Amino acid sequence: MSEFTLRIDGMHCGACVRRVNQALASTEGLDVKEVRVGAARVASEQQPPPIDRAVEALAKAGYAAHLDPTGSTEPAQAGNQIA
């Protein structure tokens, strides 16, 4: 299973975290590991991982996203996490 981190623009609160989590969780082939304000860590057993589907799902939910090449979820805000 490979993991990747997405940087997500436009997230501001716990409701945004829930929306992002729901959008990613409902996308086939993705396993949501962590969502915080500004970032999401996602896993997939597919090779290559369906990053484009994740970005598209987030765009439909109203958020711009891009792959974080460092894989870091920092500086995410503590307390706004769904695991």
Image: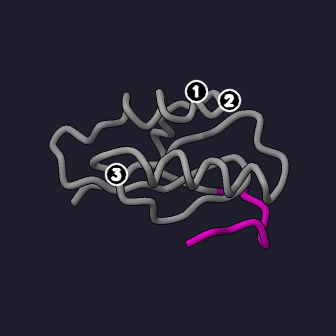
The disc labelled 1 sits on which kind of residue? Ala
Q: How many residues crowd mark 3 within 10 Å: few (<14), some (14–19), many (20+)?
A: many
Q: Residue 47 location, x and y as percent?
A: 15, 42
Say if mark 2 contacts mark 1, CB within 8 Å. Answer: yes
- Residues in magenta? 74-83
Disc number placed over residue 30 in the picture, else none: 3
Q: Name the residue located 31 percent from the left edge and 46 percent from the top edge.
A: 28
Distance of label 1 from label 3 (alpha carbons): 16 Å
Q: Tell how many labels.
A: 3
Distance of label 2 from label 1 (alpha carbons): 5 Å
Label located before the other in sequence (2 or 3): 3
Q: Residue 27 location, x and y as percent?
A: 39, 44
Which residue is disc 1 drawn over? 59
Q: How many residues crowd mark 1 within 10 Å: few (<14), some (14–19), many (20+)?
A: some
Q: Secondary structure at mark 1?
A: helix
Farthest residue, direction left: 47
Label located before the other in sequence (1 or 3): 3
Q: Residue 5 location, x and y as percent?
A: 48, 48
Q: Is residue 46 above or below residue 64?
A: below
The disc labelled 3 sits on which kind of residue? Leu
Q: Residue 35 location, x and y as percent?
A: 60, 59
Q: Name the residue located 26 percent from the left edge and 41 percent from the top edge.
A: 49
Q: Secondary structure at mark 3?
A: loop
Question: How is this picture coloured?
Answer: one colour
